Image: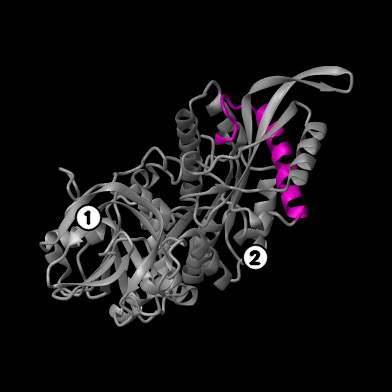
Amino acid sequence: MEEKILILDFGSQYTQLIARRIRELNIYCEIFPFNKIPEITPEYVGVILSGSPFSVHDKDSPEINFETFGNLPVLGICYGAQLIAKENDCVVAKSEIREYGRAKLSYVNSESVLMKDVELDSDVWMSHGDSITEITESFQVLASTKDVKVTSYYFKQKNYYGLQFHPEVTHTAFGREILDNFTVKICGCSQSWNPKRFVEYTIEQIRNTVKDDKVVLGLSGGVDSSVAAMLIHKAIGKNLFCVFVDNGLLRKNEFSTVLSSYKNLGLNVIGVDAKNLFYEGLVGKVDPEDKRKSIGKNFIDVFEKEANKIGDIKWLAQGTIYPDIIESVSVKGPSATIKSHHNVGGLPEKMNLRILEPLNLLFKDEVRKVGGQLNIPKTILNRHPFPGPGLGIRILGEITEEKVNLLQNADDIYISSLIKDNLYDEVWQAATILLPVKSVGVMGDERTYEYTVVLRAVTSLDGMTADWSRLPNEFLAEVSNKIINKVKGINRVVYDISSKPPATIEWE
């Protein structure tokens, strides 16, 4: 593995954004919680400490042993900067007023490596309740604002740097330059991390690890499982067996469409129609987790049956990506409930299989770049994310085949319209949700009492945060009209304008 930057997470809302910005510089980085610092091997060339909702004065505020890092350069951001200062005899005081939002640099030490090419009077983004008010002679001020003298500093004795503001957010005008200065000029990163290098390295690793063993992978038709499948296929060829299960909760005609899309990729794909099994398991279930558990159990049963038919399987491959890993090992602890539908439960233990996750270092957009390197068709690469339980978590309340058909038809109109109007690729994810309520309507001269569907569309980079898409009103009006006229059983269409957070992208 090539050089990498270690990012320690103290619970900041921006930690994942730091990683993204570093990756955009073609530098590999990893996020670990502050209380789970990995062994500092030679591959690590620098450390970044994140912000935090804590104050350094809080009773249970996060702390670390700085000796762990040896002689590595360290960049502290917000809380990270305050922690370095506090641990080295500087004064960190609670601000009378929490500083949040834009500020302008009134002083920049342009001779310093960290602040090279950063312009005076440029915007920086503040988000802190504590300030560094006094520093020792071992510290040098690198930047100031009108209200915060120690906006940035250099701790000479340790090659440590601190920023009171957040360079990772776009509101900081020269944030990219600052991160580039730290990782390239101070840490010496070569910026060689790219899709081509990743593909070559990963194929070699899979080939050396798996050897002649058989691998089984559950295909969903989405970008993650497709790219994972192609990487493994390039490494071991015919020893990869892909299983695509129709759980009755896919989009309209998706089973046949997905199977045909893999024809020219050379993948060995087994299609299994198990709709009735899944429908039977969902009878009477209303709670979202109960539905997930039923879908997950039946998937495992079907998947195990197909794997046993193949025989002598040693590995289970999954399209797990980096945000899944980050959320499950966050500083706040495992988010098992949030991620309960991602993978295949206890199947690895039950079948004594080893796990193969070739994409668990990548964000979603990086997965797409890797897929492009593997010449996977854009119809697969640009496909919107689709949850494991499928329409099972887009039908609120009990699931019936009738409701699935209603939602499939409405969703097909919505997605097809997005494609027709060249809006599909402008949206990160689009979904149609069937509500468990009926409302009064009038169609022709007749009174109706039918279901309501919600249209959802968001923009995002990786799904960890998302904003609702400003689709044209004319487009929404046309789609609404088509759904109401063409899908008997639906008489009302609404549009979801909530962002993540506080809402989630899916409704269940």
Dots 2, 1 in contact, CB < 8 A:
no
The boundaries of the magenta stretch are 393-421
| Residue 460 shows in this picture | yes
Residue 416: where, in percent of width, then height?
74, 48
Q: What amino acid is labelled 2 in the image?
A: Pro
Q: What amino acid is labelled 1 in the image?
A: Lys
First along the sequence among labels 2 and 1 = 1
- Give the residue displayed 89% in from the left and 23% down from the top: 444
Residue 72: where, in percent of width, then height?
20, 73
List the single residue furthest toward the left.
89
- Give the residue displayed 47% in from the left and 62% down from the top: 170
Q: Which element type, helix, strand or loop, lies under badge 1?
A: loop
- Give the residue displayed 40% in from the left and 63% down from the top: 168
Q: Is residue 89 within the magenta segment?
A: no
Q: Tally the marks.
A: 2
Determine whether 186 is above or below 9 in the image: below
The image's mark for residue 377 is 2
Q: Which quadrant, please, contains the N terminus?
A: bottom left
Which of the 4 image quadrants contains residue 434? Answer: top right
Predominant SS of the magenta segment: helix
| Residue 313 shows in this picture | no
Closer to the observer: label 2 or label 1? Answer: 1
Disc 2 crowd rating (10 Å Cα; few below 14, some 14-19, many 20+) is some
